[in-house]
Amino acid sequence: MSRWFAVSASREIPRGHIAHTQLLGQELAVWRSASGELNAWENRCPHRGVRLTIGSCVGEELRCQYHAWRFASGSGQCTYIPAHPTQKPAATIRARAFPVREDGTFAWVNLAPEAAAAPPPDPGIARALRSMFVQAPVAELRAVLLGGYGQGSVTATDEYTLLGEPDLEFMLQPVSDRQAIVHARLRGHREGAERLAELRHHNALLSAVRDRAEAAA
Amino acid sequence: MLLGVPLTLHLVSEGAVHATGAVYEGQERLPHVQIRYGLVWLCLGIPARDIVDFPETRESDRIVCTGGSVAVAVSGLRAVENFLDLGHLAFVHAGYLGEEPHTEICAYRVEPLVDGGILATQCRVYQPRPSPMDSQGFDVDYVYAVRRPYSVVLFKANPVEKHRMDMIALLVQPVTEERCIAHVLMAYPPHNVDVASLRWFQQLIFGQDRPILENQVPKRLPLDPRAEISVRADSSSAHYRRWLASIGVRYGAIPVASA
């Protein structure tokens, strides 16, 4: 499916961090190199299948935990095989990298190998809310949100993007057939106690959305 | 549980055991059961051959003992392959069976065994602490013999008696296609060896392997050489996969897709 999905708030993946997530059943290692480049890779080493999320970030490379093979940020190209330290790894040895973009708030992934370069629309300054994992199919989650969020109504932009009132945007991540994540952001800027109160308010609302979706599933 | 079949073992008397509760292919059967080398062995069908033989266990001066049984949520074939693997020693078992910068795996020989299986010889790795008895590192010679799909034995050069080798056998119980229990059998020449240290050491090593194995995706072993990339250091693994495919092993494996 050639479509962009938000998979995490950008700030949740600092430099040197490797995060695990899943999109449409595809396990992903989403990680950021020391220089700040974001990657979304199939979460398995092409050598013996070990999850790359148990590996470590070493500068501009991700190092597999099993045989310490290293893969370059950006291309996924294998750069070093310690068992054969004097040989340059073949160009065919690479981690499977998916197209990835950032828009200031979220990291977006496209599972199509040659995804359209167009990044998702930039909402300007926005603040991410807590991403909520839901043990329910994405359709249930969508239906609950369309039933209303707090005092406001919700409308669908497309199958995985919804708009709430005021200045609220929801992005749905289908994790698997039975699991989904709702990411959300608010336009504008807020700080301190106001920001904290806002986070608490939305945490309660998003938790209620999760509970309703899970009860319906 | 063996091959997905739940079983109950009854210790009848010292050294005798029988198994019940096996329902497979639609009917209840009494599996063949034996105790040998301190381990219980089961066959759900009609045994076509005897239990794999370890002549070293009959050398009267050797210390012979089991080394513990570790349940691992991965195909038993992946567990065997990990036991054969040289390239991970410097990383997963750093400080014991290898360490940086001694990461290079030099070419070694792999050949078929006459009775089926594979033999890997001329394997040599630098080990800082090759066994619980060694306090200093040296280049250790390894020989591996995969005698059955789930039975592999490792011979390591003994630091005292140059002409004898330590024996460590990995005997894997396929619980389901994606779960196994790895049993260890050891036979060591009797130099500064005690059973408790041998067991402690093996359990430490297996404890280091387990989190790696449980993060292998998929859990079953792919037999198609295109499924996972192999390099020269993986020669024994590549031969093992090819041999499994050639004798038609499917349980715990992902067979080569027919063209």
Image: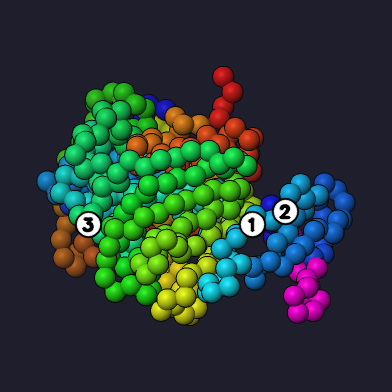
Tag 1: Cα neighbours inside 10 Å, few (<14), some, or many (≥20)?
few
Q: Is residue B245 visible?
A: yes
The residue under label 3 is B100
Residue B123 pos. (x, y %): 37, 49
**Is residue B14 found inside the magenta-colored segment of the image?**
yes
Amino acid type at mark 3: Glu
Q: Is residue B180 above or below residue B188?
A: above
Query: What amino acid is found at the position of numbered circle 1 in the picture?
Result: Asp
- Residue A86 numbered tag: none
At label 2, the amino acid type is Asp
The residue drawn where x is 82% and y is 46% is B25
Report the number of discs.
3
Residue A206 drawn above or below residue A125: below
Gap in Å between the C-alphas at discs 2 and 1?
Answer: 8 Å
Q: Which residues are magenta?
A: B6-18
Q: Is B36 situated above or below A13?
A: below
Q: Nearer the viewer, residue A152 or A140?
A: A140
Relative horizontal placement of residue A217, taking residue A53 as reference (left or right): right
Chain where mark 3 sits: B
Frontmost of labels 3 and 1 is 1
Residue B254 included in the magenta stretch of the image: no
Q: Do tag 2 and tag 3 residues touch (Cβ < 8 Å)?
A: no
- Which-is-in-front pick, marks 2 and 3? 2
Residue at the disc numbered 2: B50
Read off the residue under disc 1.
B53
Q: How is the image coloured?
A: rainbow
